[in-house]
Image: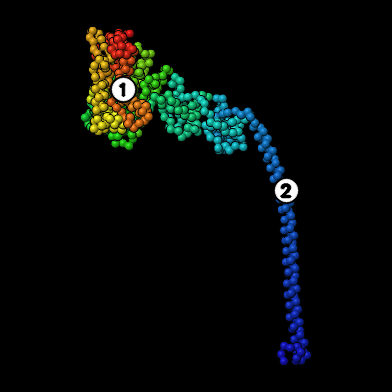
């Protein structure tokens, strides 16, 4: 039997055991009661928290509904206010130039009031500077000074307009360190203007044209004018001395005068020599003066040790003249400013004045409107100013060197003077070889008779020279009479030039093409023949006769390069319509 079994043992033992068990049961019951009470209290607290959470949720829902209603009301109010604000900014608008934008900031005590620093913009309206408000619908940080803006009836900035394009044209005279421009207008009146956004990054230089509103102080945009660009052709020629025939002695002299100082400045400095500032090429028309000037630039470019190619500024003399006082002089200044700009970058620069007598006539000669009294000094000042730049050279070309002011031709200005005479027979043959090249097709009969294309070409050149330099009644153009009563016969050979030779070859080519087309492009008719060249010579002879028939003896002597005695009479000898007509000087 178990010792703890209350059914065993004595009654007292059993009673004691039951008492202990009852006490244990009461203790357990008490603990359970306490746990139940704790659970009840926790459940009550959770219920209270739930009720509080439900109350908060209901409150949040009500607040959300009120917030949505408030947002809707606010949105409607904002829309209404915006519509009302837009309604106040209806056309018409005023155009103004924006000078500066001011963002809100703290006022400086004792210097400005709060109204001044609330933000706004400085504008120029009809010549008046004003500080105006900026519409709250605009982002003030996106407004760019110098742009065109729109003002409403309350004179508030309400928009940005397209940039203005019209204005007074002024010339840039100087670019200041700040970027502002010194511009000059009529009578060289100068003023300082600021750059608009369109010119913020522009590389402006002296002489550039800009538009400026006369009521404002802003340069609006650049204007590319053709008045100077048309007479100033900036290029690097592709003509070389090898392309020029019949002028070997002149080419050698020019190369010695130009290339040696440019390519070997140290030797000149060692011997105390100064590089020539300019070259004067003069002589009859059509003798290659312009080609020589281009070849100088090309040669300098090819031989220069610098990486910059030579620049050839081709100035068209007659087109440089302007009827307005001071404009031609201004153009000359711009030309030499361009030359100095290119030269400062290390490029050899050739400034070529063609038809020089049209610009720089002898002052006081009375043969023009005396505009040369200011044009010539301007050129002299510019040539003297080139001295500081060793890679600028001025080349002038003229058929009438007698009309050019002596100050231009004196030593120290156009130092080297080279006369380009008419070519002799050998020189003319060399020139013709430059034009009647191996690429020109020759007629098969000419090649067969000569034995080779090369020999045929040489034979054609020789026969053409015979025709050009023939001195016979067939090529006699006129009889010239001088002041002493002497007479001389003028032949076609006396008028041959490089241009005449080139014209003969071109005429022969056209005759060859005409015959080929007439033969239905039969291959047997293809190519230049001797008859084409001789027919071309006859055409040139007829043209020269027609030209002689239209000029006086003295005028012809001046323009053709005549170097004999003064002519007083010219009698045509050819069989043209003017044949036999005698004209005297002044006729």
Q: Count the marks: how many?
A: 2
* Residue at disc 2, secondary structure: helix
Q: Nearer the viewer, residue 390 or 284?
A: 284
Q: Residues within 10 Å of mark 2 (few under 14, many from 20)?
A: few
Viewport quadrant of the C terminus: top left
Residue at image location 56% in from the left, 29% down from the top:
96
User: Where 362 falls versus 302 (above or below)?
Assistant: above
Q: Residue 39 lies in what quarter of the image?
A: bottom right
Q: Nearer the viewer, mark 2 or mark 1?
A: 1
User: Where 180 falls versus 62 (above or below)?
Assistant: above
Q: How is the image coloured?
A: rainbow
Residue at image location 75% in from the left, 75% down from the top:
30
Residue 198 image point, x, y percent: 49, 33
Viewport quadrant of the N terminus: bottom right
Residue behind mark 1: 536
Residue 249 image point, x, y percent: 23, 26
If you read the primary sequence from the N terminus, does the residue marked by circle 2 or circle 1 appear first? 2
User: Where 359 falls versus 201 (above or below)?
Assistant: above
Q: Which mark is residue 66?
A: 2
- Kindly report the distance in space between the C-alpha atoms of the residues bearing marks 2 and 1: 106 Å
User: Where 39 falls versus 555 (above or below)?
Assistant: below
Query: Going by the image, does 140 lie left or right of 18?
Result: left
Q: Which mark is residue 95?
A: none
């Amino acid at each position: 039997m178990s010792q703890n079994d209350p059914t065993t043992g004595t009654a007292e033992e059993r009673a004691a055991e039951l008492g202990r068990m009852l006490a244990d049961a009461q203790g357990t019951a008490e603990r359970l009661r306490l746990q139940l009470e704790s659970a009840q209290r926790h459940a009550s607290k959770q219920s209270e928290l739930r009720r509080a959470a439900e109350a908060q949720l209901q409150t949040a829902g009500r607040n959300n509904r009120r917030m949505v209603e408030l947002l809707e009301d606010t949105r409607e109010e904002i829309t209404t206010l915006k519509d009302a604000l837009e309604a106040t900014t209806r056309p018409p608008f005023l155009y103004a130039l924006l000078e500066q934008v001011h963002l809100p900031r703290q006022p400086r005590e004792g210097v400005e009031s709060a109204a001044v620093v609330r933000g706004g913009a400085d504008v120029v309206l009809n010549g008046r500077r004003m500080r105006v408000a900026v519409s709250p619908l605009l982002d003030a940080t996106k407004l760019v000074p110098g742009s065109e803006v729109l003002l409403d009836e309350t004179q508030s900035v309400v928009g940005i307009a397209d940039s203005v394009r019209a204005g007074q044209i002024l010339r840039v005279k100087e670019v200041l360190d700040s970027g502002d421009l010194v511009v000059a207008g009529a009578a060289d009146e100068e003023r300082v203007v600021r750059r608009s956004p369109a010119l913020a990054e522009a590389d402006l230089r002296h002489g550039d044209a800009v538009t400026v509103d006369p009521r404002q102080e802003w340069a609006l945009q650049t204007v590319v004018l053709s008045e100077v660009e048309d007479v100033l052709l900036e290029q690097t020629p592709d003509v070389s001395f090898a392309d020029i025939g019949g002028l070997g002695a002149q080419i050698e002299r020019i190369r010695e005068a130009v290339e040696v100082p440019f390519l070997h400045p140290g030797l000149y400095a060692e011997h105390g020599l100064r590089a020539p500032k300019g070259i004067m090429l003069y002589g009859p028309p059509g003798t290659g003066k312009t080609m020589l000037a281009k070849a100088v630039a090309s040669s300098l470019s090819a031989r220069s040790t610098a990486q910059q190619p030579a620049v050839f500024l081709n100035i068209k003399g007659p087109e440089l003249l302007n009827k307005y006082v001071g404009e031609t002089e201004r153009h000359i200044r711009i030309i030499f400013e361009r030359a100095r700009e290119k030269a400062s970058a290390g490029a050899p620069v050739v400034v070529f004045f063609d038809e020089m007598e049209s610009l720089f006539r002898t002052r006081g000669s009375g043969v023009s409107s005396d505009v040369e009294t200011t044009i010539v000094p301007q050129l002299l000042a510019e040539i003297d100013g080139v001295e500081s730049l060793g890679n600028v050279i001025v080349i002038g070309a003229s058929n009438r060197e007698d009309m050019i002011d002596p100050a231009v031709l004196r030593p120290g200005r156009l130092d080297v003077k080279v006369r380009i005479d008419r070519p002799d027979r050998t020189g003319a043959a060399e020139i013709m070889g430059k034009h009647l090249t191996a690429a020109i097709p020759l007629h098969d009969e000419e090649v067969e008779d000569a034995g080779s294309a090369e020999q045929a070409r040489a034979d054609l050149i020789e026969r053409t020279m015979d025709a050009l330099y023939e001195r016979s009644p067939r090529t006699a153009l006129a009889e010239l009479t001088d002041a002493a009563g002497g007479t001389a016969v003028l032949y076609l050979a006396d008028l041959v030039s490089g241009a005449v030779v080139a014209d003969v070859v071109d005429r022969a080519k056209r005759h060859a093409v005409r015959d080929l087309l007439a033969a239905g492009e039969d291959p047997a008719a293809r190519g230049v023949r001797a008859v084409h060249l001789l027919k071309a010579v006859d055409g040139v002879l007829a043209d020269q006769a027609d030209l002689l028939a239209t000029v006086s003896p003295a005028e012809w002597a001046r323009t053709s390069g005549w170097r004999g005695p003064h002519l007083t009479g010219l009698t045509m000898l050819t069989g043209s319509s003017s044949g036999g007509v005698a004209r005297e000087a002044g006729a």
